[in-house]
Each structure stands twice: as C-alpha cells, then as structure tokens.
Image (cartoon, rainbow, N blue to C red):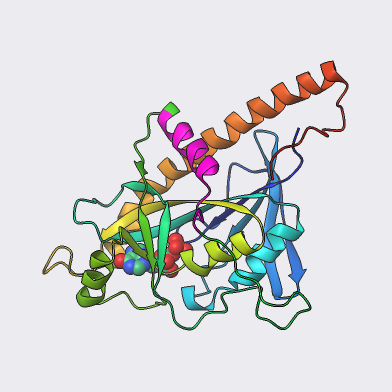
Amino acid sequence: MTAHPLGIIAGTGFYDLDALDDAHTELVDTAYGTTPVTRGTWHGQPVAFVTRHGAGHEVPPHRVNYRAIIRSLADLGVHDVLAVNVTGGIDPDLEAGEIVCLDDFLDFTRRREATFHDGTGAEGVVHTDVTNAYDPLLRRELLDAASSIGQPVIDGGVYVCFDGPRFETPAEIRLAALAGGTVAGMTGVPEVTLAAEAGLRYAGLSLVVNPAAGVRPGEPITMDDISEALAAGAPRVLAIIDEFVHTRSVFSADDSAEDLETGDVNGTDEVDA
Ligand SMILES: CSC[C@H]1O[C@H](OP(=O)(O)O)[C@H](O)[C@@H]1O
Ligand code: HPA
C-alpha cells in the first residue's frame, strides 16, 4: 500500500492536468522559496503536480526555482517523480513528435542554483551519486506503460541542458552531439540532480518538438512548428502517464487486498524507497 503522492513535473505545453480529480492548488513554502503545487487523485492515486514555468508560462527556464520545486515535492511525501521536458532533437534521426525515455544527461548550464548541499549547513560536504539519475525501475515502469498502450518510446537518450532562454547555436549543438547528446532542453538540470540529492526517484520523458539548431541545415526553429508538435505530442505523453498511474492503481489495489488477508492494514510492507 502506498500513500506517497506521485510527483509529476512538466513544463511547456503542460499547464494543468485535466485528469486530476479533486484538484486544488496550494502554495508550498520551503527553505528555498514558495512554489504552487496542484494536488489531486488520478485513478484514485494521490498526485502532486508542478508546472515548472507557471500556469501562464511566465517563468523562463533559467529562472525556474528548481530547488523549491523539488523540496516542496519531497516535503509533501513524494518518493517518485515523473518529469516531462520538451526538447530539440540533436540526433538527426529524431523526428518531431518522438518520445525519449531519458537515461543520462549532460549539464551545459552555467548560472543555476544546483544543489541542496552548498556547504552552509551542519551536514558538511556531500557528494551525490548520479550514475542512475534517471531511476532504472521507474524508467521500466514508464516503458512498460508505453508499450502496453502501443505508444512507441525510445529507450534511452542523453538530455543536454542549456541555460536558455535562447535556443542554441548550430556549433553548440554539434558540440553536444560529439559529447553523446540525444536531445537539447533548458530545464532538465538541475531538476534531476536535485531529485537525486533529495533521495527521490526520478524519470524523464522527453517529447521532441523540433530538430535542434543546425540539425536540418537551413531550417530555423519556429514557435509555430513547436506548438504544432506539442499539440500532437502532449496527448500521447499524457496517455503514457495515464497508463503508468492506472497500472500503479491496480497494483496498489492488489496490495490492499493482500494487506487485508495478511492483516497488514497499515501498509507496513511499503517498499518504495
Ligand atoms: C518553448 S520551447 C523551449 C522551452 O521548452 C522546454 O521547456 P520544458 O522542458 O519545461 O518543457 C525548454 O526547456 C524551454 O524552456
Ligand atoms: O531546440 C531546443 N533547444 C532547447 N530547448 C528546447 N525546447 C524545445 N526545443 C528546444
């Protein structure tokens, strides 16, 4: 049995979650600032949803308060976070509309508050392992959910985070490609590393909405093309998350039945770390 809300963080094109029942938005205060979190249930499962640029897309990527977002979710009891990032495809084989389940990142940002462990607390110096920053088990659940609804998802890809808010130059994208980057975005880091520092499991689905700069020579990046790809792709991303949550609801119902049989009505068999 699990009572921990599932954290969902999304950005461009994802400003509310219609699927949430009994949704209400609260301002959560943390040591790092305040962030609005919408809480509700999805297939009966508790969910805490954050739209990282704000409901009116008023916060640019370099000004998102990533620490407040992650700390607020951790404080609300979230253990698992699903993130959605829209991206430009660095891999020339990627088409707009494709979805990548990320498995690593490159941090090309320069000016972000990127840690909870800044050495000012009593804890001393802390170094966090990010070898599996995108949690393998959570990734597997997402991939299985996609597969069970017949939604193709690319298993693995390296997210390259730039500061933005401008798009990259072709030379920056060539450098990112040489380094092994798959998709380019402006929000994935430090969100993913802060989640690791906070002890949260984190997985990311990336919706490709354009070829990154210079990947299709002569083709500029336009907001019209991005909006079109988003309109077509967002429902498919949501369908995967819907199936993910639905599957969890079935398992948690099974757990409850088992708990009744074993007398473990307090859910003390909880294993989700
Ligand atoms: C409007 S395209 C650029 C914008 O979209 C991405 O946002 P998010 O990752 O929150 O979906 C990208 O990082 C930029 O912020
Ligand atoms: O090409 C891109 N670069 C960075 N972020 C993005 N978000 C959507 N497309 C892009």
Picture quadrant where residue 168 is located: bottom left
Q: Quadrant of ligand 1?
A: bottom left
Where in the figure is residue 20, as x and y percent of width and height?
A: 64, 43
Residue at screen point 78% across, 32% down: 269
Is 58 located above or below residue 26 in the figure?
A: below
Is 248 located above or below residue 11 in the figure?
A: above
Compared across the picture, whether 176 is left or right of 155 comes to left
**Towards the viewer: 3 or 15:** 3
Residue at screen point 55% across, 64% down: 193
Residue at screen point 44% across, 37% down: 143
Name the residue at the left extreme.
218
Is 191 located above or below residue 162 in the figure?
A: above
The mark total stands at 0
Asked if residue 12 lies in the magenta stretch, the reply is: no
Q: Which residues are magenta?
A: 131-147
Asked if residue 138 lies in the magenta stretch, the reply is: yes
Quadrant placement of the N terminus: top right
Compared across the picture, whether 128 is left or right of 162 comes to right
Where in the figure is residue 186, as x and y percent of width and height?
A: 42, 69
Quadrant placement of the C terminus: top right
Compared across the picture, whether 43 is left or right of 52 comes to right
Q: From the image, give the main secondary structure of the stretch colored magenta.
A: helix
Residue at screen point 31% across, 48% down: 97
